[in-house]
Structures are given as C-alpha cells and as structure tokens.
Amino acid sequence: IFLSPVIIPTWISIIPQNQIGNENMRNGFYITVDQQNRDLQVPFVAEHQLNPLLFWTTEKNRVNEIPLVYSISESILLESHEKRINKSRIEYDSPNFIDQAEAIRIHATLLINNDFVESANLRPAIILFHDLNMNNSHLLNEGIILAENGYAVLLPDLPGHGESNGSTPNLDMFYYLGDFNKTSHFYISILAACRSYEILKSISFVNQSQIA
C-alpha cells in the first residue's frame, strides 16, 4: 500500500475498521502483520483516538525541520551485464522519537547506471526498503537490476538496522508501547522513509515526478 510519500512494507497492511467488525474500537484503522503465519491485528494509535491522516500531516512536518543535507562517499564501480553501475554510500539525518532531540543518522546505498550519469537526461528513481531485522544489502541484487535499466536506486538501512543508528526494533515496541511517537519503531521508520524520499528528490539527476 502507498502512503505518499511512504511505501509501507509489503508485509504490513492498514485496513478499515468496518472490515474487522469490532464496534468497540473507533480509530478507523488497524495494522495487520503476518507473524509466523499468524495474523495479528493491532489498533493504530488506539489509546488517543487520533485520526491517522491528521496525525501524519503534523508528524511529517518534523522531517522538514531537519536541513536537507547529505554526504556521498566510497563510490565504487560495479561491472554488471556489461553495464557500469556506480555504487555509493550516502548518509543523512532523520527525525528521532518526538522527545529525543538527537537525529537518527541513516546510512544508505545509492546505485546509478554510470552510462546514464554521463548523459544530461533526468532519470526515474526507486527507493527499496528492507524487511524487519535485515539491512539494505538484502536488496542489493534487486537494486542493481533496476539500476541496469536506468533507475537511480536508493537502499536505506532503516533506523536500528544495518549501519543506521536508532533504537533496535522488537515485537513489543515495533508498533507502540505507550505514546506512538515516543516508543514505536514503526514511527521512526516511517519518518526515515519520508526523509529518504526527500533526499532522493533533491538529487540533481533525479526526475522528481518519477519516484517510487
């Protein structure tokens, strides 16, 4: 499911309350996750009876409060099917929990077809997000295939994964335990996805209207 500009991982879905049939919960949305072939239904910000869309309209502004700055280093050239793929390390800051001032440093990999780099044409771009307890290296092969076909590909390590800092996720706090924007790993992951989108959009050779 697509929650602009965030792509929610495929193993998570948000479904309307009327498809669950629980009249006692009025949030309107539940998050469902497949854990070892068991469906779990977790109320979305249930404690505060918040409207999810209004909640994220406000919280997304936290992304824009951090300067849009990134650094690119350690570029290497990969030879893949007679294509030259430029693989670079890119780092940028993303918001932390709302009661923590220090930003989360996101480490990511940027893949670009070097033949396209040498042209003046803008190119489409794709962000690939790894699963829970993985890192961006698990999607490197898929990213290379996309780069071979002319896409700029961003592979971030989500907070607490790979080389990115931030709290380490576990099933007890992946959604929330207490206040959603103070304890939920899902919260800081969504903000990191928003920040990744803004970073990719700011790169000069990326077509801003063609980012997935």
Image (cartoon, helix red, strand yellow):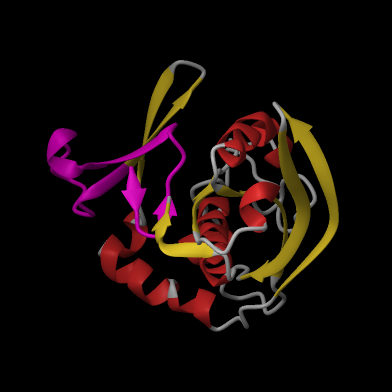
Q: Quadrant of residue 23?
A: top left
Q: Position of residue 107 (x, y in %)?
A: 74, 56
**Front-most of residues 192 and 118:** 118
Rendered image quadrant of residue 11? top left
Q: Is residue 41 visible?
A: yes
Q: Is residue 26 magenta?
A: yes
The relative height of residue 123 versus residue 144 in the rendered view (above or below) is: below
Region of the chain picked out in magenta, as a range: 1-30
The answer to whether residue 112 of the structure is visible from this angle is: no
Q: Is residue 115 magenta?
A: no
Above or below: residue 117 compared with residue 146 = below
Give the residue at x 38% y 76%: 58
Q: Which residue is more in the foreground, 121 or 56?
A: 121
Image spot of residue 82 (x, y percent):
72, 30
Image quadrant occupied by the N terminus: top left
Q: Please tell me whether residue 171 is drawn above or below residue 54 in the rendered image.
A: above
Residue lying at 52% horizontally and 74% vertically, measured from the top left? 63
Q: Nearer the viewer, residue 78 or 183?
A: 78
Question: Would you say 89 lies left or right of 63 here?
Answer: right
Residue occupying the point 34% across, 48% down: 2
Left or right: 144 as drawn, with respect to 151: right
- Determine the image quadrant of residue 148: top right
Single out the residue that lies furthest toward the front: 119
Query: Is residue 73 shown left or right of residue 210?
Result: right
Q: How many marks?
A: 0
Place of residue 136 in the rendered image (x, y in percent of width and height, measured from the top left)? 69, 41
Residue 128 in picture, x, y percent from top left: 55, 43
Q: Front-most of 43 and 195?
A: 195
- The residue at 44%/78% (across/down) is 61
Q: Is residue 189 left or right of residue 83?
A: left
